[in-house]
Amino acid sequence: MLYPAELPGRARHYSPKALIRSRALCLAMLACLWPAWSLAQTCPRAEQNVGPVAKVHSRLEIELTDGRLIRAPHLAPFEPSARGGARAARARAALEDWTRGQIIALPQRLPLADRWGRILTPLFLANGEELGLRLVAQGLARVGPSHTDPCLIQLLAAEIQARNAKLGLWADSYYSVLAAHSSAALSAHAGEFVIVEGVVQRIGQTSARIYLDLGPARGSNLSVTFSRQNAKAFADGGIAPDALVGKTIRVRGLLETRTGPQIEIYTPAAIEVMGSKA
């Protein structure tokens, strides 16, 4: 087994009733915190068997025997370091173990391949279990914001459970949710995918961009930015910048630090609205 060795300290045991209550609580929390657009979508089902797996690539792409590359759309990238490489290798080994000798199933309707030739879609074992969700639930991967993923509520509920139970990567403090005002923590994660939490102090705008400043010191505290061209899409997704001042938000994305810590986001799925400042 891959996972018990990753668990910190004494193993945790949960009764079936406790697990059901925990899942229900996670889903209820997310229903309150996440934009309404995500709740209206239906997570796809396994509707067509496409045969066995030929290979699992290092970037967690699954190559089918017909040559197609399939990748779950909701998995965040690992950092380009020895630590991140080891985590990616564990996730890849798990996918290889789960899919060995198994028939893979996909939704009936598939998107076109992206510019790297990958089809970004949920993928399932023949019993209907979604492989990306399983990775997240076991703490082997984090949820990345996706424009098209209708399974976001289930994924984030699974991530909350894994983080609370300190499964897999969540047992490593390096993957903790970062504080937007911690310059040292932000600097240590430059160029990496991160999850950051902070209070929106003010909104800034230029002719091209909108900024959410998560601290009083621009250049030291985190700024979240998105294109004004995407403003309507964000508003439709429940992210109205003016309404966020004083709110605690959690944002996920690639952290850049060239002009101060900044995360550029492209979809409302990158932001969770957690509440108001006390």
Image (cartoon, rainbow, N blue to C red):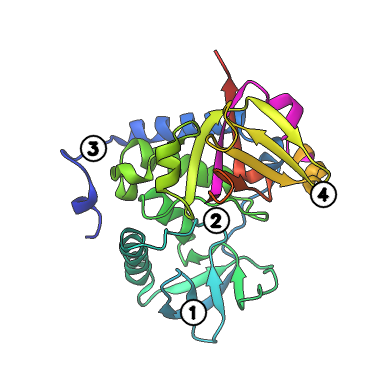
Marks 4 and 2: in contact by CB < 8 Å?
Answer: no
Q: Label 3 vs label 4: CA separation? A: 48 Å
Q: Earlier in the sequence, mark 1 or mark 2?
A: 1
Marks 1 and 3: in contact by CB < 8 Å?
Answer: no
Quarter containing the N terminus: bottom left
Q: Earlier in the sequence, mark 3 or mark 4?
A: 3
Task: Give the left or right position of residue 169, taking residue 7 as reference.
Answer: right
Q: Earlier in the sequence, mark 3 or mark 2?
A: 3
Q: Is residue 265 magenta?
A: no
The residue that label 4 is drawn on is 229
Q: What residue sits 49% from the left and 86% below the top?
A: 65
Q: Label 3 vs label 2: CA separation? A: 28 Å
Disc 3 versus disc 1: nearer the observer: 1
Q: Label 2 vs label 4: CA separation? A: 24 Å
58 or 228, which lies in front?
228
Q: Which residues are magenta?
A: 236-255
Q: Which three-letter amino acid code belongs to the residue tagged 2?
A: His
How far across and down, in percent of the image, does residue 208 sit? Answer: 80, 47
